[in-house]
Image: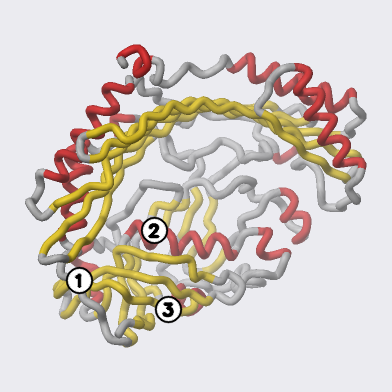
């Protein structure tokens, strides 16, 4: 048992020089097979994950993944292929597959590599790599400690869906025939716990997690377990509500989902397909004046930091929203050309969106502003239409009167339209959740329809 667990520790990353040579070989092979331009990406990742339930190990997994992807251009005809095999014969075959696709694909006037002048010339160290020399035995003990803390919180914590620990280290490198070649290592570590509270025949489940680039940034296992237990316990005694229209306060981890819907509506793909409720809104108000959303790609150690995007385009700080006005879209090179614009360095996604608080509004202050309404702490389902903006999700949370929590609620639906929801924001909290690529506090909306009994 000891030998097998020791082998489950995360493995060292390949040398940067090995990946650079691999990318160079792919690009050279593409040229040899007739491509007028090409781009290639290689990646390697090693991870260890453990899940423990009621003190017993349920899963112990070591993941080792590697891959390469190549896109070739014959003029403006494009073809792509990928493989997990790094041998020279596999590279030739993969490039040949991409070339065969390109030769049989119609030319697309918008296709091509990113413009050379937009490529990153300097690649800063953003402090994204902090490997954790964690053995499987140590991971198991951390998961057990996390779960045990939750189970010990209260006798009403009767069952568990488990405690978990995961650590991942990876290296990605991208190059293209413009001469760009860049890459960097990253790490990501997490602790999680999910438990079930039971009382008078009622059962309620909830969870908590902590995630960071550097393990020293993780919450303590005991704290993670205790928060999971507290969140489950406070759900006991849940009731349904009658249908009504009321102010709604979204918890920070849910508020960032609303911002995510906003980002989906200003992505280039949605815009050039005319499939967005925010079509042609650049330079116009889409939020109240106090709303500012910035993109900060170079935050040290942040979960979505990146010196360049997946096309090699340099990332930079910018305002997406300032004074409530939409200042920019989220574009890669292809969508930018379709729209007659320039890339914003967002091929592959956004990088650390910062939603500025509208004041020093902690949780208690926001409950006072809510006064009487619904505090939403969990959402279910996927009822969001970014074409029309229609929004309808299952929800649970707490009913609040005069700024005081009265009782938990469940089995309700909240509904509205994102366009009106965004303009109806009353406050953005200072209780910012940074566990992801969108840093956002609680979000208070003027009014939504709550459907229940």
Marked residue nearer the N-terminal end (1 or 3): 1
Residue closer to the observer: 236 or 401: 236
Labels 2 and 1 touching (C-beta < 8 A): no
Labels 1 and 3 touching (C-beta < 8 A): no
177 is higher (above) or lower (below) than 438:
above
Label 1, residues with CA under 10 Å away: few <14, some 14-19, many ≥20: some
Mark number, residue 356:
2
Marked residue nearer the N-terminal end (3 or 2): 2
**Residue furthest left in the image:** 155
Residue 91, image x, y percentages:
76, 23
Residue 183 shows in the view: no
Secondary structure under the numbered disc 1 in the rendered image: loop
Secondary structure under the numbered disc 2 in the rendered image: loop
Query: From mark 1 to mark 3, how far is it between C-alphas?
Result: 20 Å
User: Disc 2 vs disc 1: which is toward the camera?
Assistant: 1
Marked residue nearer the N-terminal end (2 or 1): 1
Residue closer to the observer: 234 or 453: 453
Residue 273, image x, y percentages:
72, 66
Residue 188 shows in the view: yes
**Image quadrant containing the C terminus:** bottom left
218 is higher (above) or lower (below) than 199:
above
Secondary structure under the numbered disc 3 in the rendered image: strand
Identified at 16% across, 73% down, the residue is: 407
162 is higher (above) or lower (below) than 254:
above
Q: Which residue is mark 3?
A: 415
Q: Which residue is mark 1?
A: 238
């Amino acid at each position: 048992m000891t030998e097998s667990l020791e082998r489950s520790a995360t493995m060292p990353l390949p040398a940067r020089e090995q990946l650079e040579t691999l990318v160079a070989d792919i690009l050279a092979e593409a040229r040899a097979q007739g491509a007028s331009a090409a781009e290639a990406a290689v990646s390697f990742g090693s991870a260890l994950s453990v899940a423990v339930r009621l003190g017993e190990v349920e899963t112990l997994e070591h993941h080792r993944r590697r891959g390469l992807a190549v896109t070739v251009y014959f003029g403006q005809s494009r073809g792509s292929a990928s493989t997990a095999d790094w041998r020279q014969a596999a590279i030739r075959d993969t490039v040949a597959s991409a070339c065969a696709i390109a030769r049989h694909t119609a030319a697309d006037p918008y296709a091509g590599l990113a413009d050379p002048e937009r490529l990153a010339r300097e690649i800063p160290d953003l402090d994204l790599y902090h490997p954790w020399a964690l053995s499987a035995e140590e991971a198991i003990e951390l998961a057990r400690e996390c779960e045990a803390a939750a189970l010990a919180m209260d006798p009403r914590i009767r069952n568990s869906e488990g405690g978990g620990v995961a650590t991942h280290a990876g290296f990605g490198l991208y190059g293209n025939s413009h001469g760009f070649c860049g890459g960097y290592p990253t790490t990501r570590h997490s602790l999680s716990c999910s438990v079930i509270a039971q009382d008078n025949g009622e059962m309620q489940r909830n969870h908590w997690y902590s995630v960071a680039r550097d393990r020293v940034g993780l919450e303590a296992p005991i704290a993670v377990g205790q928060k999971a237990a507290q969140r489950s316990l406070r759900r006991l005694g849940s009731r349904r509500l009658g249908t009504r229209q009321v102010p709604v306060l979204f918890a920070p981890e849910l508020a960032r989902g609303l911002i995510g819907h906003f980002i989906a509506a200003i992505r280039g793909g949605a815009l050039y397909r005319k499939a967005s409720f925010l079509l042609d809104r650049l330079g116009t108000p889409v939020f109240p004046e106090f709303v500012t959303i910035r993109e900060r790609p170079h935050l040290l150690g942040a979960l979505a930091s990146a010196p360049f995007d997946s096309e090699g385009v340099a990332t930079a700080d910018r305002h997406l929203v300032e004074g409530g006005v939409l200042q920019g879209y989220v574009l890669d090179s292809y969508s930018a050309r379709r729209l007659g614009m320039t890339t914003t360095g967002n091929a592959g996604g956004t990088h650390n969106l910062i939603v500025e608080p509208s004041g020093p509004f902690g949780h208690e202050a926001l409950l006072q502003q809510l006064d009487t309404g619904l505090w939403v702490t969990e959402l279910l389902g996927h009822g969001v239409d970014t074409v029309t903006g229609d929004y309808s999700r299952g929800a649970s949370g707490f009913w609040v009167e005069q700024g005081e929590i009265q009782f938990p609620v469940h089995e309700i639906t909240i509904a509205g339209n994102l366009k009106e929801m965004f303009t109806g924001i009353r406050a953005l909290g200072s209780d910012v959740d940074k566990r992801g690529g969108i840093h956002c506090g609680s979000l208070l909306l003027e009014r939504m329809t709550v459907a229940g009994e």
